[in-house]
Amino acid sequence: AGMAGAVTAVRLGVAPNRARRRKLTSHDAGRIDTGRVVACAYAVCVGAVALGEVSRRAPGIASMPSRGWAPTASPKTRGGSPPRAVPAVEALDAILGDGPARDAGAALGAAVGAYLWVKLFDVLASKKILERKLSRKVIHTTSGPFFALTWPLFSSSPAACYFAACVPALQAVRLFGIGSGLIKNENAVRAVSREGDKSELLKGPLIYTLVLVVTTALYWRGSPEGVAALALMCGGDGMADIVGRRLGAGNKLPFNEDKSAAGSLAFFIVGFGMSVGFVALFHHLGYMEMDAGAAAGRLAVLAAACTVAEALPVTGVLDDNISVPVLALVLGSFLFH
């Protein structure tokens, strides 16, 4: 039922784009964009929740063999208590404790860091030191990975992932406030939007933060497919645009002139490399049982599949911030479990 609701929401959210595109006026932008935001947010959240519930409730699914990997619903698999003692994690536990106070402090620190990071590019874009489109894509490429690097600061409590998920959730509220006109912040609009229209914040940027909420709360630091979805959406998709705009003029894809071979290659290399890096990090810290070597082949399959999905001519129908992470989570649930 959850997946059916997600599919329906996607259809509702993208239907307006099937008509010939036109420049929105201030009168109709809010009405159309708000409906699309609600539909896309519902699709992402309901679809991910359904996937999470299926993976937790379903019996073990046969898959490719791997070293030392036996998926369970325990905190170990989801990145709670490390499955083995790691000096770095033990040192953090000794210094920061292991309870709600630590998680609240880590969430506050991560939220302040995230705000300052985006604020930096707000200022650079407002002073025209950095091109607006480049600023937007640098934020897209780096914000999610930098947030994931703060995950080891959280405790081994089962509730730690929800404290962490509050960080992108707060950013989602901020984006919604700015995009809907409830909060006035022209610098944020210049840094994050494509054309300087505040309503754009209700599309890709808001969906981006909602995907971070889902991957954090439902998959967390013990899930290879979770960190891969984050890496491919942030690093892969972001670098595809940056590289494609600069090096893709002479190598357009035959089936999509808006995308290039250079951009697709950047998507695969950066998305795959970042996925392997996060798996290696969380395995080293003891949160993930599968190591990077055992995961590399499957991560390459995920990266290749998402590279193809990102290159398809469906930009006006389905946002890459939905198609890429959802494909990574769905395919990853079969490859890793």
Image (cartoon, rainbow, N blue to C red):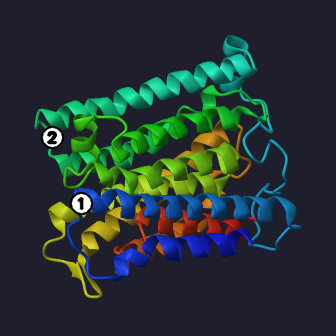
**Image location (x, y in percent) of residue 254:** 26, 87
Tell me the CA gap for discs 2 and 1: 16 Å
Q: Are marks 2 and 1 in contact (CB under 8 Å)?
A: no
| Residue 130 vertical position relative to residue 30 in the rendered view, above or below | above
Q: Is residue 273 visible?
A: no
Amino acid type of disc 1?
A: Val
| Residue 285 vertical position relative to residue 290 in the rendered view, above or below | above
Residue 56: name its quadrant. bottom right
In the rendered image, the residue lying farthest to the top is 95
| Residue 307 vertical position relative to residue 71 in the rendered view, above or below | below
According to the picture, the residue beneath numbered tag 1 turns out to be: 243
Give SS at disc 2.
loop
**Image location (x, y in percent) of residue 26:** 24, 56
Q: For this view, does 48 lie left or right of residue 111? A: right
Residue 229: name its quadrant. bottom right
Q: Residue at x 50, y 63 (%)?
A: 40
Q: For this view, does 334 lie left or right of residue 43? A: right
Mark 2 and mark 1 lie on one chain; the one further toward the N terminus is 2
Instruction: Give the class, few, some or many, for how many residues have Cα within 10 Å of label 1's Cα (few <14, many ≥20).
Output: some
Q: For this view, does 256 lie left or right of residue 236? A: left
According to the picture, the residue beneath numbered tag 2 turns out to be: 130
Q: For this view, does 63 lie left or right of residue 105? A: right
Give SS at disc 1.
helix
Q: Total of numbered circles in the picture?
A: 2
**Image location (x, y in percent) of residue 68:** 79, 54
